[in-house]
Image: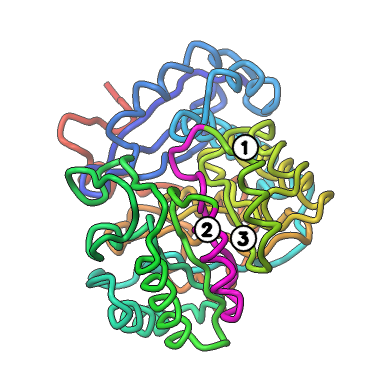
Amino acid sequence: MKITDLKCMVIGDLHALLVRIDTDEGISGLAQIEGSKHFYLKPHVLFYKRNILEQDPTDVERVMLRIRRLGAFKPWGSSVSAIEMALWDIAGKAAGVPVYKLLGGKIRDKVRVYNGGDMPYAPSGLRLEGTSPEDYFNYASKRKKLPGQFKIMKFGIGFHSGMPWTFPEYHYGEKPLEPRAPYLYQEGLTTERGLKYTVECVKSLKEALGDEIGLALDCGPGWKVPAAIRLAKALEPLNVMWLEDLITGDYTPYTLPDIYRQVTESTSTPIHTGEQIYLRQGFQGLIEKHAVDIIGPDPCDIGGMAELKWVAEYADMHGILIAPHGVGDGPIGLAALVQVSATLPQNYIAFELPIVAAEWNGLVEGLAKDMVKNSFIEVPDKPGMGIELNEKAVRKRLKEGETYFDDE
């Protein structure tokens, strides 16, 4: 079997960049780029075509050796990751087995997920209206009622929220011209009033969720060490699941393990990071220095599914837990997360369920609307990643000027 083409297309209203690898035996593999990157990564994906043509797609590692060093931290690892996932999809279909069989086999028949936003196919309109403690309480109360019976939910606070713009003198730092400008994050030492305000908001979240739902917090990046330690210690009585991306994260092209370790060693509140990191080498310092308690690699950024599993195994050797990121990965990324999470060692907590808006309904076959039950998803046994596109439906939703996988 040989690779004959690498193609992309964008579904307009969903801002979704889909990737397909074709072969001379008529088997194709699908993948997806995280939604926020759709408008600039298509050329980057196609850049790799010349490196993979005529290669055997079932020799996944051999193909990846040709392109892996050409990627980088988020967002520049997304293209490499998508190609890797599409290769596994082909390999599974060619062998007639689900991808998890090729990654070493599953150790769990169903995988736990956590909610970082609306669940797949949930009604739109569920949004945080403000950043007051009351707003957080109301929002958490609504999220708690989502179908799926989630046992863990994550909320944005601090620099991963509107707090720096809505609360006066939140921190000793400069404010950008517009709130939440793309990739333009706040940072600085939090004021005493800002810190107290953040803690009150977290208390409201905890009050709404109770002790039956674990509370995870996406915090930054942007915190400075003294304030990060104060926040983590102040939240110790609330038993939160983790504080994510306090120091670095998202589009930060470095990890600062020595800085993270100062925070982690100062508190019993679990510290988490990793969604932007590319390849196992990017995680090496965090893991070997025990700089964090939990890592959160994203299969759409780390370099793919096999790379994520390798890092999970290495983290497990060092007593570090894993809760993979995935909120923007879409339905194909969701299928990939299910496959790889079924194979991860026992340091696995849960993966972040991608937000799949109701508008995806009918475009992808293989994902049920009610797939999440009691916070778990059953691992499917279909070949490859177990999903296919509804070509007729997708063609109607393409971005203006796009053709279906660049068909002539």
Q: Residue at x 64, y 21 (%)?
A: 63
Report helix, strand or loop for mark 2.
helix
Callout 2, which amino acid?
Answer: Ala
Residue 380 badge? 3
Stretch of the chain drawn in magenta = 226-253
| Residue 12 within the magenta-colored segment of the rendering | no
Residue 182 horizontal/vertical position (percent): 28, 41
232 is within the stretch colored magenta: yes
Give the residue at x 64% y 64%: 270
Q: Residues within 10 Å of mark 3 (few under 14, many from 20)?
A: many
Numbered label attached to residue 88:
1
The residue that mark 2 highlights is 228
Tell me residue 402's x, y (percent): 22, 31
Q: Which structural element holds mark 1?
A: helix
Q: CA distance from mark 2 to mark 3?
A: 41 Å
Label 2 vs 3, first from the N-terminus: 2
Which of marks 1 and 3 precedes in the sequence? 1
Q: How is the image coloured?
A: rainbow
Label 1 vs label 2: CA separation? Answer: 40 Å
Give the crowd class for mark 2: few <14, some 14-19, many >=20 residues within 10 Å.
many
Residue 323: x %, y % from top left: 62, 58
> Looking at numbered disc 1 in the image, what kind of residue is underneath it?
Trp
Q: Is residue 314 left or right of residue 245?
A: right
